[in-house]
Image (cartoon, helix red, strand yellow):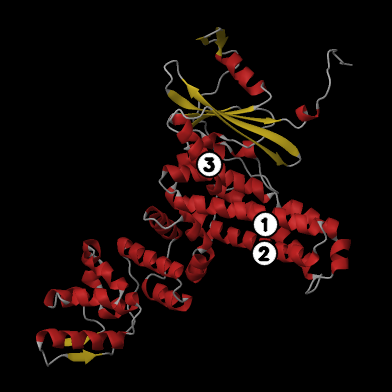
């Protein structure tokens, strides 16, 4: 009997079935071999050299241990150990690659040394695709790994796969395509990042407080420009993420949304610190934010966009493009028109269809005019938690676009807000509550946000109505006004 780097694990286990238990005790990684799918794929082609890489064990040591175990269990004395051999080729089977990738990411989260994991990655599956990373992150979340934990180590994932991702061909999309516009915005953002870094590099280490105060206006102007990235993020959240969710890709989207919120928060903090003339803290926070933005560009163009291009159909991209104008663009506009249709029936001017209501009869046009001229923003979520309507008023408080229609309302909020949204829906559905309201201050406005449980004549829950209103001026009212003061 000869054991070598080229010995097939499947052949070995067929001859010595007891080695399965031995390997499972030797390393948790070898428990994958107990999976029937893995046995049929990796087991049939994997050599001991490859198995050693998966288990993180030096091949010579593994061969010696296997020889000793076989001799102990069978009494064989003629076992030859041959440690000569070559490096194995990368694994191509999709299921096997995904299992190995999941194992690598799980080890990252468990704190295994990145150098070891990088070697395992390049030895086994170095030609990674963006969609594979996204699918594996999705699987890990579905298997119970908290999204917050995946987000926390997202940058480490990227570092492990960075060299492989960098070798992928650069994206090229036609002008006007949503991805083309996203990338135009990224190029503009990179220019602002470069200008901001050049400015704060002048301050020295530690930063000269007097110079920071002297250039405070210029820094704030650049922070204002950086903050336009919020429009870029809003299009992703309201247009791109919904169609990915329709293809059951939810985990990577929610992780990226949480990273958006981290950047938003960091920009606000940097703005406040600079305004308060806290030079050292302000410059440090700004440097951190610039790196977060640069990392986001990388994640988009190396992982998110390639995955979306591979996954989405032309009809999906038309849907993404449809609502972009309503949200707007950051720094740039699309370079050219791009074919975009409409998936929703528009109410035509003069539409004469009439609806008999409880207290009157209105045409569809009249109903639409009323809803879009109310001094509030309306959003309606049906009994299945799906967004089915929003009022497109002239100046909406919170951006909405057609991509939100049909989307689960839980997916329309940042991850940190989902628990609150779910609690409101659960309490409304159970009949325990009828109203939930909040008030917040944002961009110099005082906003009142109310949620109402809607019930039919029999008391059955039929959905939730969200009403948002800017009450900044209303709060200032005092006394009485009885006369018309038009001029």
Q: Which mark is residue 420?
A: 3
How crowded pointer 2 is (Cα within 10 Å; few <14, some 14-19, many 20+) is rated as some
Residue 226 in the image, given as x and y percentages of width and height = 71, 54
Q: Does dot 3 land on a helix, a strand or a loop?
A: helix
Q: Does dot 1 land on a helix, a strand or a loop?
A: helix
Q: Mark 3 or mark 2: name the one nearer the start of the chain.
A: 2
Residue 318 visible? The answer is no
The N terminus lies in quadrant: bottom left
Q: Name the residue nearer the viewer: 266 or 297.
A: 266
The C terminus lies in quadrant: top right
> Mark 2 = which residue?
288
Q: CA distance from mark 1 to mark 3?
A: 23 Å
Residue 268 in the image, given as x and y percentages of width and height = 71, 53
In this picture, residue 462 sits left or right of residue 193 = left
Q: Is residue 2 above or below residue 33?
A: below
Quadrant of the rendered structure where residue 7 is?
Answer: bottom left
Residue 266 in the image, given as x and y percentages of width and height = 67, 57
Q: Name the residue nearer the viewer: 67 or 12.
A: 67
Q: Does dot 2 land on a helix, a strand or a loop?
A: helix
In this picture, residue 260 sits left or right of residue 432 = right
- Residue at coordinates 44% horizontally, 25% vertically from top-left? 461
Q: Are marks 3 and 2 in contact (CB under 8 Å)?
A: no
> Mark 1 = which residue?
266
In this picture, residue 474 sits left or right of residue 381 = right
């Amino acid at each position: 009997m000869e054991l070598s780097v080229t010995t097939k694990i499947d052949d070995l286990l067929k001859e010595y079935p007891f080695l399965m238990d031995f390997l499972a005790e030797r390393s948790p990684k070898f428990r994958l071999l107990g999976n029937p799918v893995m046995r049929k794929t990796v087991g049939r082609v994997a050599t001991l050299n490859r198995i050693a890489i998966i288990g993180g064990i030096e091949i010579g040591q593994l061969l010696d241990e296997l020889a000793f175990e076989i001799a102990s269990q069978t009494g064989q004395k003629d076992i030859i150990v041959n440690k000569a051999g070559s490096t194995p080729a990368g694994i191509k089977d999709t299921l096997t690659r995904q299992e190995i990738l999941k194992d690598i990411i799980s080890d990252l989260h468990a704190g295994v040394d990145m150098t070891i994991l990088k070697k395992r990655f390049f030895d086994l599956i170095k030609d990674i695709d963006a969609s594979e990373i996204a699918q594996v992150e999705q699987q890990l979340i579905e298997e119970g790994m908290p999204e917050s934990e995946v987000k926390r180590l997202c940058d480490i994932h990227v570092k492990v796969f960075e060299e492989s991702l960098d070798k992928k061909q650069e994206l090229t999309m036609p002008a006007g395509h949503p991805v083309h516009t996203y990338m135009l915005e990224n190029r503009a953002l990179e220019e602002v990042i470069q200008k901001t870094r050049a400015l704060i590099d002048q301050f020295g280490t530690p930063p000269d407080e007097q110079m920071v105060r002297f250039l405070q206006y210029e820094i704030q102007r650049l922070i204002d420009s950086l903050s336009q990235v919020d429009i870029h993020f809003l299009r992703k959240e309201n247009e791109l993420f919904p169609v990915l969710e329709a293809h059951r890709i939810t985990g990577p989207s929610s992780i990226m949304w949480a990273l958006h919120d981290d950047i938003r928060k960091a920009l606000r903090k940097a703005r406040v610190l600079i305004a308060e003339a806290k030079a050292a803290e302000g410059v440090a926070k700004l440097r951190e934010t610039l790196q977060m933005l640069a990392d986001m560009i990388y994640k988009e163009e190396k992982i998110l966009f390639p995955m979306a291009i591979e996954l989405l159909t032309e009809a999906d991209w038309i849907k993404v493009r449809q609502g972009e104008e309503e949200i707007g663009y950051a720094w740039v506009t699309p370079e050219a028109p791009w074919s975009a249709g409409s998936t929703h029936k528009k109410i035509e001017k003069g539409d004469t269809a009439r609806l008999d209501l409880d207290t009157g009869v209105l045409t569809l046009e009249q109903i639409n005019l009323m809803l879009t001229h109310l001094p509030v923003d309306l959003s309606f979520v049906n009994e299945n938690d799906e967004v089915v309507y929003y009022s497109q008023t002239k100046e909406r408080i919170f951006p909405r676009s057609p991509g939100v229609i049909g989307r689960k309302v839980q997916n329309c909020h940042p991850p940190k807000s989902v628990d609150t949204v779910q609690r409101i829906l659960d309490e409304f559905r159970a009949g325990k509550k009828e109203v939930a309201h909040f008030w917040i201050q944002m961009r110099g406005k005082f906003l009142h946000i109310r949620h109402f449980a809607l019930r039919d004549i029999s008391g059955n829950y039929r959905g939730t109505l969200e009403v948002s209103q800017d009450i900044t001026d209303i709060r200032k009212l005092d006394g009485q006004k009885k006369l018309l003061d038009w001029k």
